[in-house]
Image (cartoon, rainbow, N blue to C red):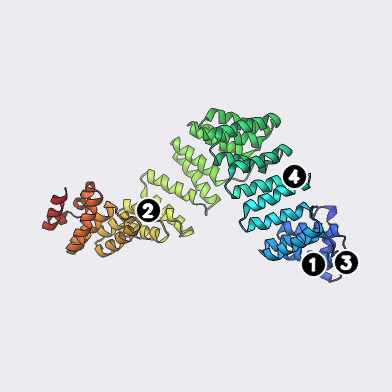
Amino acid sequence: MEFSHNDNNNLPLTKFESMLKTNHVLFFDSEEFENIIHHYLNQGKIALAKKAIKMGMDQHPTSINLRLFRVEVYVFEDKLIEAENLLNDLYVIDPLNEEIYIQKANILSKKDEHQKAIDVLKKALDMTDDVVDLYSLIGMEYLFLDNFKEAKVYFMKCLEVDLEDYSALYNIIYCFDFLKEHQEAIAYLNIFLDKNPYSEVAWHQLGKQFMSLKKYKKALAAFDFAIISDDTFVGAYLERGKVFEKLKRYEEAIENYTITLTLDDPTTFALLRIGACYEKLNNDELTLHYYEKAVNEDPIMDKGWIAITKFYIRKKNYQKALYQINKAINIDTENVVYWKLYSQINQRLNFYEEAERGFKKTLELGNYELNTWLSRGDLLIKLGEPEAAIYNFEQAVEFYPDYAELEYRLAGLYFTLNENDKGAFHLKNGLRCNEDYTFIIDELFPEVLNKVMVKNLLRTNL
């Protein structure tokens, strides 16, 4: 039983909490203790659950169910040895209790012994008529093993017993998706819908399968049925909006996304999609209106700031783009995408020092894309900092060995500093990696081409 503050059945809970305040020990039957403990565990109030278990055990020392709750708490606290020892004692007393097997499987799962957990759970199937929870647990263990075919079988068994078990349905579709069995998923969902034709969840999932296969008209029909089954189903309107976008029917996409704003609290996803649709329709005023609404709705979510910044970049309004990305960085200084955009915008504005600072920050945050190293190094060359550029490219070589784009840059830099031996070493490396990239020397270091050593190396190897 689950207690509720608006429930007349919560008297034992109220009595128990009153007892804790007064320190007067009152008597509860074992079932009342079980309900109290179950309530606290569901609420995540482990300390209170442990108090209830101790008091329950004091009053009912032979209760197997109360000792099983103690096992559950041991497992939660990773006291697996204590849990196993207590379970072994309980098995001797009641070897046909399926809950003992469930807790044993839970311990094995915690130890990443998932196949053993499955074997134990399958034994428990013979001891109970209430098999749905066991099927679900077995399915989850198969998921831990990445055995999606077997997982799918057991989640299907859940649905055979209970057509309303939508968590099982979602897990089944997850397995189909992972196995890329979209046609099989469609066939299964159609069979399910024959039995449960007003299941908005199944229609919704059917539509998503058609989306995966780019069968947009069939997807629309499925989402329509989902909405007929439940005209407040936000997910169906969102998916229908996505389909209309794919079909370039932007007004209808906007209409569907807008409906979601009236059914539930506005989501940044819907606001951004509406803005994107208006941008496709060349309505700049409404595009900005919805992008700004998305940012105001959730300033922490980066997609809004990225959308509004890229909008201004596409309009070549780099000053406003820079203003927006600076606002975003002030909120989240650790966002790599923000810093990359910051660098690109500053480059367009010829603010090379700021652009270099942005690329440096991007690298410090762990974004080691080749283009980031190249962009920063080239900016350092422009800024007249050859030593810093060399250090940058040498760091890049650790991640991208034998890349001609890096070797030619290092060659040019070393020749510029009259470190000819190092220059020759990297020029030879560059020529060995890819002769077609020699234009880098010409573009970035034209003065180096006049050196006799460079001319000879290029003549010899080309």
Residue type, numbered disc 1 = Lys
Q: Quadrant of residue 279?
A: top left
Residue 369's disc is 2
Q: Give the mark nearer the N terminus: 3 vs 1.
A: 3
Q: Can residue 36 be spotted in the picture?
A: no
As measured in the structure, the alpha-carbon distance from the residue carrying label 1 to the one carrying label 4 is 30 Å
The nearer-to-camera label among 3 and 4 is 4
Residue at point 45%, 57% (across, down): 329
Residue type, numbered disc 2 = Glu
Q: Nearer the viewer, residue 219 or 35?
A: 35
The reply to whether dot 1 and dot 2 touch (C-beta < 8 Å) is no
Q: Quadrant of residue 262?
A: top right
The reply to whether dot 3 and dot 2 touch (C-beta < 8 Å) is no
User: Is 232 located above or below residue 94 in the figure?
Assistant: above
The nearer-to-camera label among 1 and 2 is 1
Q: Nearer the viewer, residue 272 or 37?
A: 37
Q: Nearer the viewer, residue 300 or 429?
A: 429
Q: Give the mark nearer the N terminus: 2 vs 4.
A: 4
Residue at the disc numbered 4? 131
Q: Can residue 177 be spotted in the picture?
A: yes
Q: Position of residue 241 (x, y in %)?
A: 55, 35
As measured in the structure, the alpha-carbon distance from the residue carrying label 1 to the one carrying label 2 is 57 Å
Residue at the disc numbered 1? 54
As measured in the structure, the alpha-carbon distance from the residue carrying label 3 to the one carrying label 4 is 37 Å
Q: Position of residue 223 (x, y in %)?
A: 60, 32
Residue at the disc numbered 3? 26
Residue type, numbered disc 4 = Val
